[in-house]
Image (tube, grey):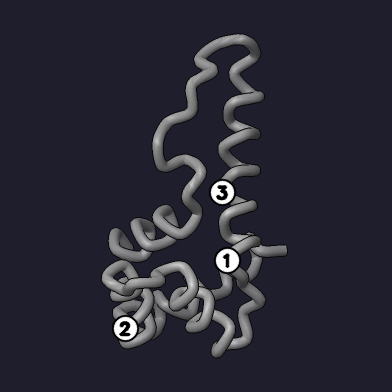
Amino acid sequence: MIEQELNKLLRAARQDDDLKKKLIETKNSDNPVEDFCAIGQSLGCKITAGELFCVGMTASDAKLRSVNGGGVNAIDGWDDAYEQFIMTLEWT
């Protein structure tokens, strides 16, 4: 599953400062998600742009379903798994 692949990449980046820097620098790329996925794939992580977008939407949808009739408006950024990964990496 994509979540396991992202966790694998996150663990690797936390142990390797050069990898962490490369992943964070994808923010400045013309194609940040594609470059992020390419780095992950080069390390054996099965991460594609489509799966990355899908996992973000799935997580956001699950949060919205869990409110049981309350706050039905999504919060910006909940559906962006790439941004959440990068923020997690920057803060750890």
Which residue type does callout 2 highlight? Asp
Q: Nearer the viewer, residue 54 or 87?
A: 54
Q: Residue at x 51, y 43 (%)?
A: 79
Instruction: Where is residue 90? Give x, y as percent.
Output: 29, 63
Q: Given contact means CB atoms under 8 Å apart, are the residues at marks 2 and 1 in contact?
A: no
Q: Which residue is under mark 1? A: 49
Q: Secondary structure at mark 1?
A: helix
Marks 2 and 1, how far apart in space? 24 Å
Residue lying farthest top? 69
Q: Quadrant of residue 31?
A: bottom left
Marks 3 and 2, how far apart in space? 26 Å
Tell me which numbered mark, 2 or 1, is placed earlier along the sequence.
2
Tell me which numbered mark, 1 or 3, is placed earlier along the sequence.
1
Which residue type does callout 3 highlight? Gly
As drawn, 85 above or below 12? above
Q: Which residue is under mark 2? A: 17
Residue lying farthest right? 1
Q: Which residue is under mark 3? A: 56
Q: Given contact means CB atoms under 8 Å apart, are the residues at marks 1 and 3 in contact?
A: no
Of the residues tagged 3 and 2, which is closer to the observer? 3
| Quadrant (top left/top right/bottom left/bottom right) for the C terminus | bottom left
Marks 1 and 3, how far apart in space? 11 Å
Q: Residue at x 48, y 83 (%)?
A: 39
Residue lying farthest front? 30
